[in-house]
Amino acid sequence: MNKTVTIPRRQRCAVYTRKSTEEGLEQEFNSLDAQREACEAFIASQKPEGWVLVHDGYDDGGFSGGNLERPALKRLIADIEAGLVDIVVVYKIDRLSRSLMDFAKLVETFDRHSVTFVSVTQSFNTTTSMGRLTLNILLSFAQFEREVTAERIRDKIAASRKKGMWMGGVVPLGYDVKDRKLIINEAEAATVRMIFERFIRLGSATLLARELQAEGRLTKRGKPFDKGVLYKLLNNHVYLGEAVHKGTAYPGEHKAIVDRVAFERVQTILATHAKTRAGATRRATPALLKGLIFTAEGRAMTPHHTKRGERLYRYYVSTDVIRGREIATDVPYLRLPADTVEAAVLAEIRRLIRAPEIVAKVSAAVRNDTPDIAERDIVTALDRFQDFWPSLFPAEQARITSLLVARVTVGPDGLAVDLREDGAKAMVREMLRTSVNEAAE
């Protein structure tokens, strides 16, 4: 009687290793070597099951697990898509990813190409629903640990700020850094005091910037002074010998350059001028949807206004109406009150940027460019849009609108807003950069 022998199917196994920092990688036997050795031993133990090692190395030394921008990982994915790998073997699952969203993408790629994922130190089989559940739970804890670490770092920065310590960043004009402390640079400090004194005398950042440019004076980074640079300098509490964290000033370890009387006189001038500028800006309110709004028939709608006494009435009017073309007289959307349609567009923008599919796309786009930005911070920035909007002057609101909106179409069924996802990404980056700058002040 002949005995049937079943030969197991050949399973090509790729070992992936990762270490977040480059520390220790120069050693003859480092962390990556230890991970690979454990994985290769596990593969050898599964030889009766048909497991064979793919000898190409997939080692990412000095790369964070918080994103997918890793050269060896990209090469591994390319080989999976080319059908060269059947099983991915890692020492621990967080070597592959510490982000739940990124890991879901990887598992989807594995499934699409019938690739199994195995962790040497943890029993997982991603081909079963229970294996997926267990894996996601463990990965959630890995992500939790990463976020807790980030919170501890932020708490440490806050505590250090409250003690008046310099926590890095762009060194202000007038100071140098020595042993992680701000030390007065006397030559630059004289320039800072001169700027405060001349602003008090001139009362205008525009005039002061012109004078400084004419004199060839430069910022700490070697660039000419402009209004933006001057406003930041004149509002910087560092020059009072203070450290600021989230709007609260604490006594700093460094010495002051400007006395409090001069600093407060500057703030009074700035506050007075801000009210004047705000009033003038509001009187010259720009059309929020200029160049963006069209009728359902494809006709542009242009800003138009009438004045009755002291009151200004703004509209968006179809070019058909302006040019006297023959149109149906019962079409209501050819002439719309500007305030009403702008409010409706703003409400639709708020709804769109909080829609889960838009949040996911914008988050992925931002993290693709800047992997170290946490998903939670991106979602928070989008949620903050409602509070962020009123703080902007009308001209800035118009700029943000043109950044976010590709087209507004009005018709018999209402209005439709086409959102620019790349614009939403740019806005989020601006909001996050603003938050970082505020935290650093």
Image (cartoon, helix red, strand yellow):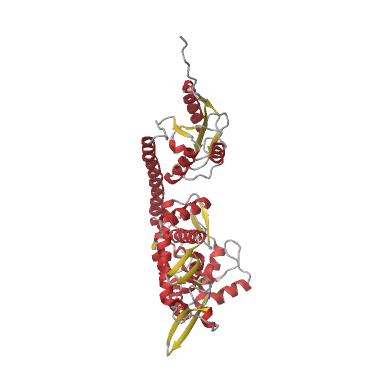
Residue 45: x percent and y percent? 46, 22
* Quadrant of the rendering where the N terminus is positioned: top left
Farthest-out residue, top: 1
Residue 199 on image: x %, y %: 51, 75
| Quarter of the rendering containing residue 141 | top left
Identify which residue, 211 or 416, lies in the foreground: 416
Q: How far across and down, in percent of the image, does residue 314 sit?
A: 45, 81
Quarter of the image where one finds residue 212: bottom right
Q: Quadrant of residue 346?
A: bottom left
Q: Is residue 389 visible?
A: yes
Frontmost residue, 70 versus 85 = 85
Is 163 on the left or on the right of 371, as rendered?
left
Q: Quadrant of the C terminus?
A: bottom left
Q: Residue at x 53, y 38 (%)?
A: 60
Camera-side residue of 231 and 307: 307
Residue 272 vs 399, above or below: the answer is: below
Query: What is the tally of numbered marks visible in this picture?
Result: 0
